[in-house]
Image: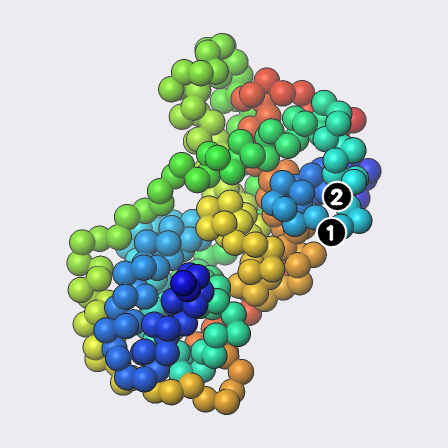
Amino acid sequence: MTNERESDQVLVARVQAGERQAFDLLVAKYQRRLMRLVGRLVHDQAEAEDVVQETFIKAFRALRHFRGDSAFYTWLYRIGINTAKNFLVTQGRRAPTSTEADAERAEGFEDADNLRDINTPESVMASKQIAYTVNAAMEALPLELRTAIVLREIEGLSYEEISEVMACPIGTVRSRIFRAREVIADKLRPLLDMPDNKRK
Amino acid sequence: MDTHKKIREHISAFADGASAAADVDLALAALQGDDGRQTWALYHHIGDVLRVDPGPPLSPGFAASLAARVAAEPLPGKRTVNAEAPAVGVVPVASA
């Protein structure tokens, strides 16, 4: 029995041996996961789709260099993240700074007051408000923090895998994920009527 | 970094099963208290909310369009002895 990494490697070897269709199988497997990741970094859907397509093309061209020392998906994600980053740079955009994220955080407290008035935390309304708040906080995160927490919470990668994808030490991964959680938690805490234990 | 922040970072890593062996006891000790348990619950709540969002869909023509582009590419060929590098033009992600 093969695990996911090994079966990917089998397909990669097939492509390297000249079987083009094997790459289609990898695309079919990873296109939605890659879109989910890139869609968190490049917010316009059509642009995100272009980045995903470009990522697969770059991966196909570079496949001759892939030896399987890392998992195919961590290699693919790394190309995807860097392609997204390059795209944002060429579009003259930048990820929000921490200061902007802090400003966003401050704005969220108005919504929190409204939610407390509803006083029905189980309601659909409250769930939507929580989802909105968490996702809005995500959008405002600096790119590196957003990437790290998406890879961990949504894609389920280990810290070691994230360090490979983001080309940074594991300690940096740990710090980025923690900082991302802190920013999001600051926005979410008032909605859940939790005291701010950060200031103790 | 203040003590409480450091403790929350231990909880964050522990929540991901990524604590250093020496830090596990610190995280467990922090989780004995109300603040620690609240932080634990909050971090997991965030993850649960993020995982609900399926992300943007791919347009119906995506697969065909990509397949056509791949078909126009020369085959990548067998691997070389070079280290596996990301594609040309890929830049490293900058440090935070």
Q: Locate residue B51, reporting x and y percent.
A: 44, 40
Q: Locate residue A161, reporting x and y percent.
A: 55, 60
Q: Specify whether residue B16 is in view.
A: yes
> Would you call the spot at circle 2 few (<14 residues within 10 Å), some (14-19), or many (20 or more)?
some
* Foreground of the two, B14 or A180: B14
Amino acid type at circle 1 is Ala
Tell me the residue that label 2 is attached to: B24
- The image's mark for residue B20 is 1
Where residue B32 sits, quadrant-wise, is top right
> Would you call the spot at circle 1 few (<14 residues within 10 Å), some (14-19), or many (20 or more)?
few
- The image's mark for residue A36 is none
Q: Chain of mark 1?
A: B
Q: Specify whether residue A142 is in view.
A: no
From mark 2 to mark 1, how far is it between C-alphas?
7 Å
In the image, farthest residue toward the right: B3
Amino acid type at circle 2 is Val
User: Is A55 drawn above or below residue A66 in the view shown?
Assistant: above
* Foreground of the two, A41 or A29: A29
Q: Locate residue A142, reporting x and y percent.
A: 56, 50
State which quarter of the image contains the N terminus of chain A.
bottom left
